[in-house]
Image (tube, grey):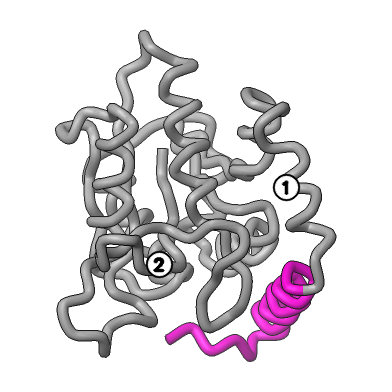
């Protein structure tokens, strides 16, 4: 299970945590916390499966903030708080954006011979991830290889499957908001740029 890191926010102890739907980053509304909760629900639903969780992301857009932790470290901390064993979590902290996260994942799949890989992110983010995979020949091939099984999963869909009474209203309100519509517009622009070959990957 691969959790792509995105945005962080300060917690009440002046530390860092993943964002809720009323928070975001330089690109707008985010809701990264849903990815952590969704991954935990998937793990609990498959108690007999041997699994690894990849917490992905370096400092990214926060690289100039002194003392800033890696996104991967924050994701790992929150997974452990949910009860996920620390020895089941791998940190990937070399990447600083979504495309770099996918490139590092590609290396990890080959080096560790990973199988049945599920990438979890927010629903609004998945079209751009698909576009990145389509742009990269190796990732595209991996997505069609049955022995690897590279698939994308929307955190929102997982939450609605397992805990609809908790999440249905919150998700609906978030996706009806102006902030989310602006975020989706930006994501669509990114997809169009990737397809046109003019996307700034670094």
Image quarter (top left, top right, bottom left or bottom right) of the N terminus: top left
Left or right placement of residue 168 versus residue 69 in this view = right
Inspect the magenta stretch and tell me whether residue 184 lies in it.
yes
Majority secondary structure in the magenta region:
helix
Say few, some or many: other residues with alpha carbon within 10 Å of mark 1 (under 14 / 14 to 19 / 20 or more). some
Say few, some or many: other residues with alpha carbon within 10 Å of mark 2 (under 14 / 14 to 19 / 20 or more). many
SS for dot 2: strand
Query: Residue under circle 1?
Result: 171
Q: Quadrant of residue 46?
A: top left
x, y (%) of residue 173?
A: 79, 53
Q: Is residue 94 above or below residue 86?
A: below
SS for dot 1: helix
Left or right placement of residue 20 versus residue 188 in this view = left
Left or right placement of residue 195 versus residue 90 in this view = right
Determine the residue positioned at 53% across, 31% down: 146
The foreground one among 202 and 125 is 125
Furthest residue toward top: 48
Q: Quadrant of residue 106?
A: bottom left
Which region shows up in magenta? 179-202
Numbered badge on residue 104: none
The foreground one among 37 and 116 is 37
Numbered badge on residue 8: 2
Furthest residue toward right: 176
x, y (%) of residue 130?
A: 63, 58
Image quarter (top left, top right, bottom left or bottom right) of the C terminus: bottom left
- Cα separation, mark 2 vs mark 1, equals 19 Å
Determine the residue positioned at 26% across, 61% down: 13
Looking at the image, tell me whether mark 2 or mark 1 is earlier in sequence order.
2
x, y (%) of residue 160?
A: 70, 32
Q: Quadrant of residue 83?
A: top left
The foreground one among 167 and 116 is 167
Determine the residue positioned at 71% across, 46% down: 170
């Amino acid at each position: 299970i691969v959790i792509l890191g995105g945005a962080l926010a300060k917690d009440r102890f002046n530390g860092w945590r993943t964002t809720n739907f009323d928070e975001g980053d330089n690109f707008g509304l985010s809701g990264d916390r849903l990815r952590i909760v969704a991954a935990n629900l998937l793990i609990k639903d498959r108690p007999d499966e041997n699994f690894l969780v990849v917490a992905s992301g370096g400092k990214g857009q926060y690289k100039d903030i002194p003392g800033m932790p890696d996104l991967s470290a924050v994701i790992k901390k929150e997974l452990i708080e949910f009860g996920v064993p620390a020895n089941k979590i791998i940190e990937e902290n070399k990447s600083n954006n979504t495309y770099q996260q996918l490139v590092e994942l590609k290396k990890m799949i080959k080096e560790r011979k990973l199988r049945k890989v599920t990438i979890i992110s927010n629903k609004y983010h998945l079209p751009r991830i698909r576009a990145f995979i389509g742009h990269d020949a190796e990732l595209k091939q991996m997505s069609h290889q049955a022995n690897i099984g590279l698939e994308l999963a929307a955190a929102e869909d997982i939450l609605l499957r397992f805990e609809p009474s908790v999440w249905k209203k919150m998700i609906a309100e978030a996706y009806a908001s102006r902030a989310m519509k602006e975020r989706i517009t930006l994501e669509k622009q990114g997809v169009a740029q990737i397809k046109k070959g003019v996307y700034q990957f670094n």
